[in-house]
Amino acid sequence: MNTILLKHNNVLDLLQALVDAHSSTSIDLIICSSRTEFIAQIIAGLQKEPAVSQVEDDGHGGGSETESPIKPTHPVLKPTLNRLYTSQNVKLIFCPTVSALRAYLSGYLVQLPRPDPTSQRRTVIVNSLALHHGSSEFTVQGLSQTMATMVAAGARARRQVQLVECMDSQDSNTADHGPQLWNNEVPLLSSSLKIGEGGARWGLRTIPVARIASRWFEFKDVDL
């Protein structure tokens, strides 16, 4: 069953769960942003970690405590052998626009080798709702099209599809990122569509995003 994971709402915690997963699992990690934006999210998250004081030798046998803004305190930065091995099975894909995401998923099977039925394969898609939010695609029609494409791609590639919405590490108070987006209500159609008066009233009806997603996905508050 394809799932929506509610547990990992922090990008660092998500990455930690991925590298701590079983090493035999092949994971395609689709990031719904640019590479630059994703790295900025990671750095912002690391900067919020408690700084670690370290003693530096002053050359005279003494020392002084200094703090660096980024120290490897988060578990994801600890290079254990299992994490180093598991990370080789994680493939990163960046889709900064809705059209790029749909195009990538539409050709998903072509880009994959013949699947081994005995191996575990998963596709984890991060922040797909945030990608749609604020655009003309944040509607029942737009979300349904994207989610149907996700599920079809997973079926062709024989992969389980998992969706995760992470908070904005740079601004945790923003309303356009995070699992709370599943509670939003969206109109049936984009307001940019030119339809008659009666159709306009019908098209502006709203439906909860979670209800749309439940057609293809099961909500779970569990680990990866």
Image (cartoon, rainbow, N blue to C red):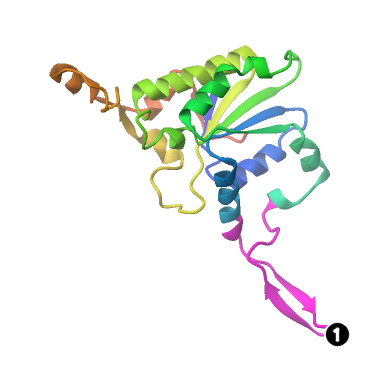
Place of residue 200 in the rendered image (x, y in percent of width and height, measured from the top left): 19, 22
Q: Residue at x 61, y 36 (%)?
A: 223
**Which of the two residues, 207 or 47, is positioned nearer the viewer here?**
47
The residue sitting at the left extreme is: 197
Lateral position of residue 176 relative to residue 10, left or right: left
Place of residue 129 in the rendered image (x, y in percent of width and height, measured from the top left): 44, 33
**Which of the two residues, 172 or 36, is positioned nearer the viewer here?**
36
What residue is pinned by disc 1?
61
The residue sitting at the bottom extreme is: 60
Q: Amino acid at mark 1?
A: Gly
Place of residue 12 in the rendered image (x, y in percent of width and height, measured from the top left): 61, 47
Residue 45 lies in the magenta-colored region? no
**Which of the two residues, 54 or 35, is positioned nearer the viewer here?**
35
Lateral position of residue 191 relative to residue 124, left or right: left
Residue 51 lies in the magenta-colored region? yes
* Magenta extent: 46-75
Secondary structure type for disc 1: loop
- Residue 9 shows up from this direction: yes
Place of residue 69 in the rendered image (x, y in percent of width and height, measured from the top left): 63, 65
- Quadrant of residue 53 within the rendered picture: bottom right
Q: Residue at x 67, y 37 (%)?
A: 18
